[in-house]
Each structure stands twice: as structure tokens, then as C-alpha cells.
Image: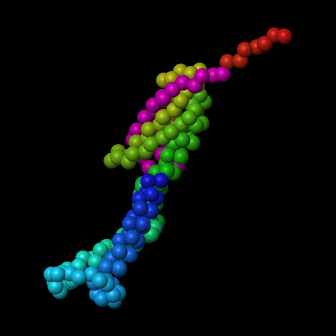
Amino acid sequence: MAKILDRLLLFLYSLSIGILSVIAILLLSGAIPDTLEIQDGPAAYIAAIAVAVILFLLSIRFFYISLRRDRASQPSVDQRTEYGDIQISMETIENLSLKAAGKVKGIRDLKSRIRVSQAGLEIMIRAVVDGEHSLPLLTTEVQRQVHDFVQETTGIPVADVSVYIANLTQSPSFKSRVE
């Protein structure tokens, strides 16, 4: 959202500076008659026109930047095979880790973050558990599932899987009513 606002402000700024510099160039060059008198002579006119032209060129550059599409690529993990290059986005690896962790019973509200290190992928899983299962067994199972699934699916070595238990879900308690 902030990036869109920044581009909009840059667009409006460059448009207004561009219009002002064109008006200044036209006034100073005599294309538009004016009643403006400058006492310093031709040197002041040349300096004012130079500043207006520089502002105009800067506004064109800012205008272009505000309108162009962002071509920056998403972060990815790159692999080289005998057939060519493979790029797997970090978002794909996050979704694969969430899919693997979601297969473990007792885990809810998963979130993941991926970092790339020299040893391989470092996967951090944040989860909420139901509290009905042993936490050491549950976290070990999540680590094993995520490690094996991501490594088998992507072919990228997984160095570490960290599991953070954020909270415990409260199971709804139903009171039976006798009528």
C-alpha cells in the first residue's frame, strides 16, 4: 500500500514540477509575453533557464519512474541442472512447508518463514496447537514432515526446521442441558 502511495505522490510531484518548469522556460525565453523584469541582465536569464531545464529533465525522469512497472524479481532459490536453470520462489517453499506441517494432527493456524543459508534452507514454522497431544512429539513430527516433504519436492537441502508454538487453542466446551 505504501509503495502505491509513494508512486502516486511521485507522479503528482513530477507532473507539477514539470508544468512549472515549462512555464518558467516559456516565460524566460520570451515565448510568452510577461511583465517580469530582471535587473541582473542576460546572466540571470541564462541561469534561470538552466535551472528550469534541469528541473524539467528531473521531472521527466521522476514521471517515468512513477509510471514504469516494477520489474524486480521475487526472491527465489536458484538451482542449476544439466538441462538448465530452475528458480523456485520463496513463496512456493513457504506454501510447501505449510502443506507438510498441516498434515500433522493437532496443528492449527500455521505460518512459515524461509531463509537461505550456506547449509541449505532454514524453515521457521509458527503454529497453534490443540493441547491434546504431547508437544515434543508434535513438534518433532512437524519438523520431520516439513524437512522430508520440502527436501523431496524441491531437491533443495533443508538445514534446519524450527517450530515455535505460539499458543494453545481452547476446545469449545459444550454443556449438556437436561430438560
Placement of the C terminus among the 4 image quadrants: top right
Depth check, front residue: 57 or 100:
57
How far across and down, in percent of the image, does residue 172 sit? Answer: 66, 22
Q: Is residue 66 above or below residue 1?
A: below
Depth check, front residue: 104 or 171:
171
From the viewer's perspective, tell me whether residue 122 is left or right of residue 141: left
From the viewer's perspective, tell me whether residue 125 is left or right of residue 42: right
Please tell me in which quadrant of the rendered image residue 81 appears: bottom left
Q: Is residue 98 above or below residue 164?
A: below
How far across and down, in percent of the image, does residue 154 sit? Answer: 49, 51
Please tell me in which quadrant of the rendered image residue 3 appears: bottom left
What's the magenta region?
147-172
Question: Which residue is most to the right?
Answer: 179
154 falls in the magenta region: yes
How far across and down, in percent of the image, does residue 25 sit? Answer: 31, 82
| Residue 77 visible in the current orientation | yes
